[in-house]
Image (tube, rainbow, N blue to C red):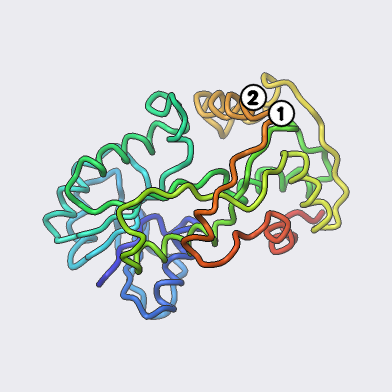
Amino acid sequence: MLTLVTGCRGRVGSTLVSLLHRGGHAVRAASRKPAGLSLPAGVPAVACDLGDPTTFAAALEGVGSVFLYAEPSHVDDFLAAARTAGVGHIVLLSSSAVLTPDAASNPIAASHHAVEEALTASPLTTTLLRPGAFAGNAYQWSAAFRGGHPVALPYPFSQTSPIDETDIAEAALAVLTDTRFQGAAYHLTGPESLTATEQVELLAAASGTPVTVNAVSPEAWKESVSSFVPAEIAEGLLGYWAATDGSPAEVTGDTEKLTGSPARTFGAWAAEHAAAFRA
């Protein structure tokens, strides 16, 4: 069965393509701009812009399953094209933010919630992957590390259970290739709850770069990221960090259930990516 993987410029999508190909599964890599994708030899690339329905039919031709990113603007058109093409199973990369009571209006959760609603209302078999914070979110601090500056944190003791993107890709591989796991929802987390300060400390130890944490006001942080983080998203992040300040993040067993291995630690991720945090 041919699997279409959308969003192949992202870390999860690109890793999943390699895992499927390595396992002998037929896979097609999709991206809004497929030219220049770094793919295993023999893996075809196709244009699929989830914001442009005219790209759907060609991308889905002959496809039996899809790994889908949560773009709500034309999800109904995508589902109609998928049904026409004979797709039987869609795996959605959603977010654990949909588990909050205000998911429909939460600026971080809303797009994922809308796509989940559309998928679960369709006749297609749907599997929902709901990861929490990505370990790769730590790249936001890499410039401070490399420049020898303190890491500015509005809520230094906000806690998450960061998950390695490789674990997300391996979980996606499992649900795409093993029917036992299909048609359910999974809350994917890393193996431990860590404060933002503890994550910075682990990165400092792994990279050998001494860095301090500077507690800043929410307003100062919002202003510092205003050129690249939309105000609505910044407010959503601040609200999330405030709600989790000093509160241990949930840790589930779903990652290990799907991958068959314990979830990778943030310390291991930090060691693997230490070069990005060296001055």
Question: Residue at the spot x=67%, y=59% of the render?
Answer: 269
- Residue 273 screen position, x and y as percent: 69, 60
- Residue 19 screen position, x and y as percent: 45, 71
**Nearer to me, 41 or 154:** 154
Question: Residue at the spot x=34%, y=51% of the render?
Answer: 184
Q: In which quarter of the image is residue 180?
A: bottom left
Vertical comparison of 187 with 182: above or below: above
In this rendering, would 15 be left or right of 80? right
| Label annotation for residue 135 | none
Q: What residue type is labelled 1?
A: Tyr
In this rendering, would 64 be left or right of 102? left
> Residue at the right extreme?
210
In this rendering, would 272 be left or right of 79? right
> Residue at the left extreme?
84
Question: Residue at the spot x=25%, y=58% of the render?
Answer: 89
Q: Quadrant of residue 144?
A: top right
- Residue 116 screen position, x and y as percent: 32, 40
Question: Residue at the spot x=29%, y=59% of the render?
Answer: 66
Task: Describe the element under mark 2 as helix, strand or loop.
Answer: helix
**Nearer to me, 73 or 86:** 86
**Nearer to me, 49 or 183:** 183
**Nearer to me, 151 or 79:** 79
Q: Quadrant of residue 8?
A: bottom left
Q: How crowded is mark 1: few (under 14 residues within 10 Å), some or many (20 or more)?
A: many
N-terminal-most mark, 1 or 2: 1
Q: What residue type is labelled 2?
A: Ala
- The residue that label 1 is drawn on is 155
Q: Distance between the residues labelled 1 and 2?
A: 7 Å
- Residue 202 screen position, x and y as percent: 78, 51
- The residue that label 2 is drawn on is 242
Task: Describe the element under mark 1 as helix, strand or loop.
Answer: loop
